[in-house]
Amino acid sequence: MGADVKVVPYSQRRLTGTKTALDTLSAPVSVTGWRVDDASNTVVVEINRHARDAAADRFVATAKAISPAVRVVEVDESPTPLYDTRGGDAYYIGSGSRCSVGFAVTGGFVTAGHCGRTGATTTGHNRVSQGTFRGSSFPGNDYAWVATNANWTSRPWVNRHNGTNVTVRGNTEAAVGASICRSGSTTGWRCGTVQGKNQTVNYPQGSVSGLTRTTACAEPGDSGGSWVAGSGFGQAQGVTSGGSGNCSSGGTTYFQPLNEILSVYGLRLTTG
């Protein structure tokens, strides 16, 4: 026996043509999108039921004038762009300074405390609203964490600034003498060696204890960025605090160990 043949009112060509015509229109934000729905043999126009307004109704009237195949479906939410939270990327505090993301955690990311005070707002590398500092400690320590909004998704990545990412697998601490690399939004990916641990550094704003000393260079704007070591550089180590020198002549850079930050704020590192 052969399959049943169902005759539909509108051909695929007509449905596609209707959708293409709608693509030329300017839609209000209350209209969340439109698509060909083969199952119902219609072109579905979706509208946020909580934001439906006269502009949406005018769009629907125009759409139905183009084709009777248009069908309206009300939805509860409007889509928004989604962005990745990735170690080593830039973020901005308030309307001014720039720092770097340390590591993504559930619901946000860790960074340096001197980058912002609790309550300060942030925007991402693309200047899109990102989040708020939920905790910050500096001097004494140099750590903080930012809770991101729903537009941002925590990813287990660190930017190598060459078009690729390192995938964070865990947070096993590297020994003195180990090779280590860091990622930051000013000078990108730089590497060196762990020289010592539990160092106290006296900054102009006050001393910070418990830092790890390295031979890798860094510059302003790299603050808060990721430090990684181990196989494939998959073990998260800490966030950039400060140092001396630069990436032209070389220097010494210190980082705030990650495990202390996770413990203090009860955070969970995002791993892959």
Image: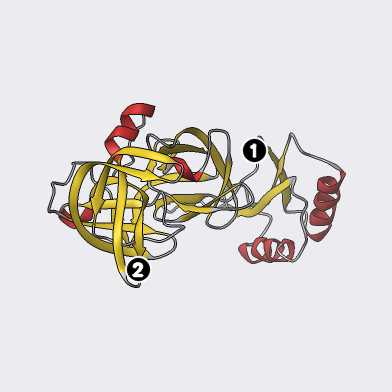
Q: Which mark is residue 77?
A: 1
> In the depicted view, which residue is nearer to us: 253 or 80?
253
Residue 216, compared with residue 228, is above or below; it is below
The residue located at (74%, 34%) in the rendering is 50
Label 2 element class: loop
Q: Position of residue 164 (x, y in %)?
A: 33, 64
Query: How many residues crowd around disc 2 within 10 Å: few (fewer than 14), some, or many (20 or more)?
Result: some
* Residue beneath disc 2: 247
- Mark 1 or mark 2, whichever is nearer to me: 2
Query: How many residues crowd around disc 1 within 10 Å: few (fewer than 14), some, or many (20 or more)?
Result: few
Q: Position of residue 217 (x, y in %)?
A: 31, 62
Say which label, 1 or 2, has the lower sequence index.
1
Q: Is residue 221 visible?
A: yes
Residue 167, compared with residue 149, is above or below; it is below
Distance between the Cα atoms at labels 1 and 2?
47 Å
Q: Amino acid at mark 1?
A: Glu
Label 1 element class: loop
Q: Which mark is residue 36?
A: none
Left or right of 143 in this view: 237 = left
Outermost residue toward the bottom in this view: 248
> In the depicted view, which residue is nearer to us: 103 or 14?
103
Residue 227, compared with residue 109, is above or below; it is below
Left or right of 22 in this view: 57 = right
Q: Quadrant of residue 247?
A: bottom left
The residue located at (66%, 60%) in the rendering is 15
Q: Amino acid at mark 2?
A: Cys
The residue located at (80%, 60%) in the rendering is 66
Q: Is residue 142 visible?
A: no
The residue located at (12%, 53%) in the rendering is 177
Q: Position of residue 64 (x, y in %)?
A: 80, 53
> In the depicted view, which residue is nearer to us: 8 or 30?
30
